[in-house]
Amino acid sequence: MYALVDCNNFYASCERVFNPNLRNKPIAILSNNDGCVISRSDEAKAIGLPMGAPIFKWEGFCKVNNVQVFSSNYPLYGDMSSRVMALLEQFTPDVEVYSIDEAFLEFKGFDNHNFDDYGHQIRGRILKWTGIPTCVGLAPTKALSKVANKIARKFPEQTKGVYVIDSEEKRIKALQWIKLEDVWGIGRGLQKRLKVKNCKTAFDFVQLSDDWVRKSFSITEWKLKKDLEGISTLTLDEVKTKRAIATTRSFEYTFSDFDNIKERISTFAMSCSEKLRKQHSSCHMVYVMLSSDRHKKQEEQHRASRVVSLPSPTNSSLVISNCAVKAVASIFKRGIKYKRAGVIVTGLVPENNYQLDLFEQENEKHKHLMHTIDHLNSKYSDYKIKLGNQDLKRTWKMRQERLSPRYTTNINDIIVAK
């Protein structure tokens, strides 16, 4: 048996946990640099605030409808997500964290359990211990648990936030109800190809012959079909190391001077290096990109990138930052107002298992220095140790004019009871 536990309107729910005055009020959470809406409460959806709405166009609408608008508070959301995922491990050791607000659970050896009761226990404990409302869908396969979760979310009064597909009758009814575009794993391209076969629902999809699906699509689509039929073919994914690591950001403002851009690139390179060391990897190549604001078409546009191959694999912030700064210097054009940049490290290999270079090796002192920097930053947080060409006052230069307190990760923002 599988379960999908999904946090309802997660970002908005995190804001409500520490500010009860926001309950039953429309809430909108903005993207980096307060650009557009990336999360809405049910109340905001009900009054017609669309996903992805540019806030500068919808500012008046939000004021008229008393929508509470917040900047993304990622430290708070990440910490609350960790708390929810830790609670899920109390119910089964087999947990796959699918995203910041949802996870798959597999129940092995739970044959005699009442899964409806168990689902309510999961939901109740998360709500009581974190204040985050969730929906729980349970079914014999991963794909069906996704369908069950959608039913629990769509019909909260009837299901009380928990729905179990535990019979053939329930499975068929659920597949007949869910539209093809709402099925987990079916994207736009696959939708178009299936609609040629007059597939409108998930039930129509599973009526197709196995042979036709195998010939027309990949093994992934065939496994999805079998999963929807109640035959488990999709298992929990193991945590894998990434093949590439990226840090890309829009700037707080447009920059036309090289000093500001160099500082941003150095910070992005530092972030990539830290992520490399966390997964015990090194990189062979550094990819740097720089682009102007494409929305300001009246201004001169410029977009460029550069790849730098390293003589030997490294995860040293010093080496990667130096390469990234040299790369961005070679593509920078004076007079252009740049809005976005990024650093991607690729060609990843294990840090303790790679081909040595006969003539050139990285300074052995870098490993000890990086270990010390990581230890100090972990101990004191807020990234106290930085490179000399980084901004010493701020980690990311993002516009966050509506940021709520970091209630759980900053001691100065902890709620004080009087």
Image (spheres, helix red, strand yellow):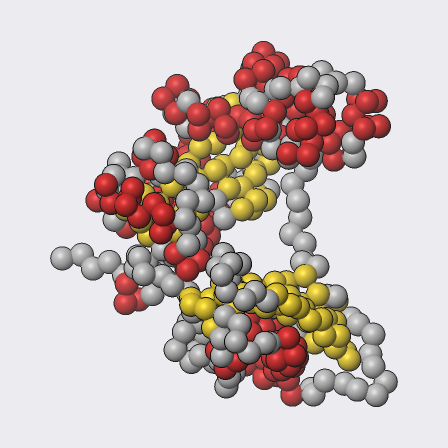
The residue sitting at 79% across, 34% down in the picture is 218
The residue sitting at 64% across, 34% down in the picture is 188
Percent position of residue 170, x then y: 56, 15
Percent position of residue 130, x then y: 36, 46
Question: In the rendered view, does 114 fall on the left or right side of 159?
Answer: right
Along the line of sight, which residue is nearer the eye, 14 or 65? 65
Question: In the rendered view, does 172 fall on the left or right side of 362?
Answer: left
Q: Can residue 276 be seen?
A: no
Percent position of residue 333, x then y: 59, 76
Compared with 338, 415 (above or below) is above
- Picture quarter containing residue 246? bottom right
Along the line of sight, which residue is nearer the eye, 404 or 251? 251
- Picture quarter containing residue 270? bottom right
The residue sitting at 39% across, 56% down in the picture is 34
Compared with 10, 82 (above or below) is below
Compared with 310, 137 (above or below) is above
The residue sitting at 32% across, 43% down in the picture is 27
Along the line of sight, which residue is nearer the eye, 225 or 118? 225
- Outermost residue to the left: 418
Percent position of residue 367, x then y: 64, 81
